[in-house]
Structure formats: structure tokens, C-alpha cells
Image (cartoon, rainbow, N blue to C red):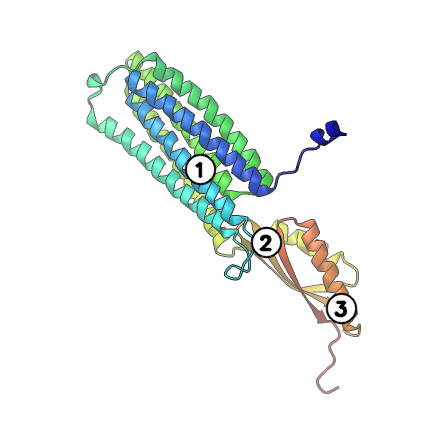
Amino acid sequence: MNKNKKMIKKELTNEQIGIKVAFNTVMVNLILTAFKFFAGIFGNSTAMIADAVHSLSDGLTTIFVMIGIKLANKKPDKEHPYGHERFECVAAIIMSVALFLTGVGIGWAGIQQILSDNYEEMPVPGIIALVAAVLTIVVKEAMYWYERAAAIKINSSALLADAWHSRSDSLSSIGSFFGILGARLGFPILDSIAAIIISVFILKVAIDIFRVSVGKMTDKSCDDETEGKMREVILAQEDVQGIDLLKTRMFADKIYVDVEICADGLITLHEAHSIAHTVHDAIETEFPKVKHCSVHVNPVDLPDDSE
């Protein structure tokens, strides 16, 4: 009996999954940051020290993600009767800004190094800095897939943004690797060129995350494919004779639906309510992201005013 109880795993809520993943990410970032600072200082590598600062920023922004997930999963209250999901979008926007600034910083540092033209005075990095770069690439790429899988599972835009932040650190470490390797082989300019190229990719990811998050904050409608499937589900319900109106709006990662259906105008109010309730349940069952569905019934054969 006790053995069977131990085998039964308690299902974690989306909030618990998000917080657990974010916490694990913070801890890994702190350990990795400490090692990179050590490698950068004792390995005589400014690129690795800059990379360590990037990892530190990852840890700090992940804390924002934890706060965002915690707030987003709060139950509706008097001041926020529709819930708190948009707090997660706020966290994702903060993440995108941090990612954008990181990209600008990496790119600008690369440009400054090229313009300075003093590569002969740069010290040659040690082998430990090269090892730190390889380790960072492996660890941060693994963290990207770890966070990405959790973000998709719990439908968290903030956690997905943080996953891309982890990948940006992996990409910047690729630049650090080739820069350190190039410096050890006598071609220090490779560090600057790689940094600029990587910064472009980081900036694109930051802009994409910002655009999607702002769209969710401004009541953007669902895509045409989702609305098309909703129409099919609604029309498949018994006694629904047509759809006069279908409106959707994104509320963070959730969906609100307003629909006006057509039904026989001679049926009773109880029958009309039953049809509306059937449509409501079908939409919320078929589309898990739908937080609320409002259904209005219009009569098909409304009599003329003269009658």
C-alpha cells in the first residue's frame, strides 16, 4: 500500500512547473556565471568576462519570469475580475527589452574593437577561457530546450522568452569561443566579427518576443485558422442554424470568445438557453486556451413589426 502511494506522483500545476523550471535556471546561471568570471579573470580573457556578465543578466531576468508566472496565476479579484494573465506578458516584454539591450551591447562592443585597431596590444587568452566557452555553449543550449519544453507545456510566453535568452547566451558564447580561439591563433578580429553577427540574431529574437507580447496585451484576435475551426465546432452543434458574429481576443495566453448564433425563433427561452450552453461547452472543451465564451442567440424567423 505504501509502495503504491510512493509510485503515485502528484500532478504539478502550471504555476509550480514554471516556478520550478525558472528556479533551476537561476541556479544553473549563478554557477555558470561564477565559473565564467573565474575563467575570464585567470584566463586573461575580456570576452569571457563580458560573457559572464551576460550570464548574470540571464539570472536576473529569470527572476522577473518567476515573478511574472506567480502573478499571472493569481485568481481573479475585485480589482482584476478577468484575472492576472497579462502580468506574464509584462514579464515577457521586460525580457525582450533586456535581450535587446544585450544584443546592442554585444554588437557595439564588437564594433568598438574593430574601430580601435589595437589588436597587437590584446593579451592572449588562456585555455581555461576556451573550456569555459565550450561548456557554456553546451549548458545554455540544454537550458534553452529545457525551458522551451516547459514553456510550451504550460503555454508561458515569459518562460519561452527566457528560453530564448538562454539561447542568446549560447550564441554569444559561440562568438566568445571563436574569438578566443582566433586570438590564440593570432586572429583576434574574429572575436569582433562574430560578436556583431550574433548580436543581429539576438536583436531579431528580442523584437519578435516584444511584438508577440504587445499583441497579446492589446486584445489581438486569434489567427484565421483557429477562428475557422471554432466556426466548424459551433456549426456542428445541434439546432445551430448559422453564425451572425464571431469575435475573439487574446488575453495574454488565453482567449475570450464572443459569438452570436442563429436558432429557430419559435423555440422556448429554455431551449435557446440550452443551445447556447451547448455551444459554450463545446468551444471551451475543444479549445483549452479559451478562458471564457459568451454566446448570444438570435432568432432566424423574427416576425415583422406590422405583425
Residue 288 shows in the view? yes
The label shown at residue 62 is: 1
In the image, residue 217 above or below residue 209: below
Determine crowd level at label 3: few under 14, some 14-19, many 20+ residues with C-alpha closer than 10 A. Answer: many
Looking at the picture, tell me which residue is in the foreground, 75 or 253: 75
Marks 2 and 1 sit apart, C-alpha to C-alpha, by 26 Å
Q: Are marks 2 and 3 in contact (CB under 8 Å)?
A: no
The picture places residue 78, in percent across and down from the top left corner, at 53, 62
Residue drawn at x 49%, y 36% is 22
Q: Residue furthest bottom?
A: 306
The label shown at residue 272 is: 3
Determine crowd level at label 2: few under 14, some 14-19, many 20+ residues with C-alpha closer than 10 A. Answer: many
Q: Label 2 amino acid?
A: Ile
Secondary element type, mark 1: helix
> Which of the two labelled residues, at mark 1 and mark 3, occupies the earlier sequence position?
1
In the image, residue 177 above or below residue 256: above
The picture places residue 217, in percent across and down from the top left corner, at 48, 53
Residue 92, quarter of picture: top left
Residue drawn at x 52%, y 49% is 72
The label shown at residue 32 is: none
Residue drawn at x 32%, y 37% is 104
Q: Label 3 amino acid?
A: Ala
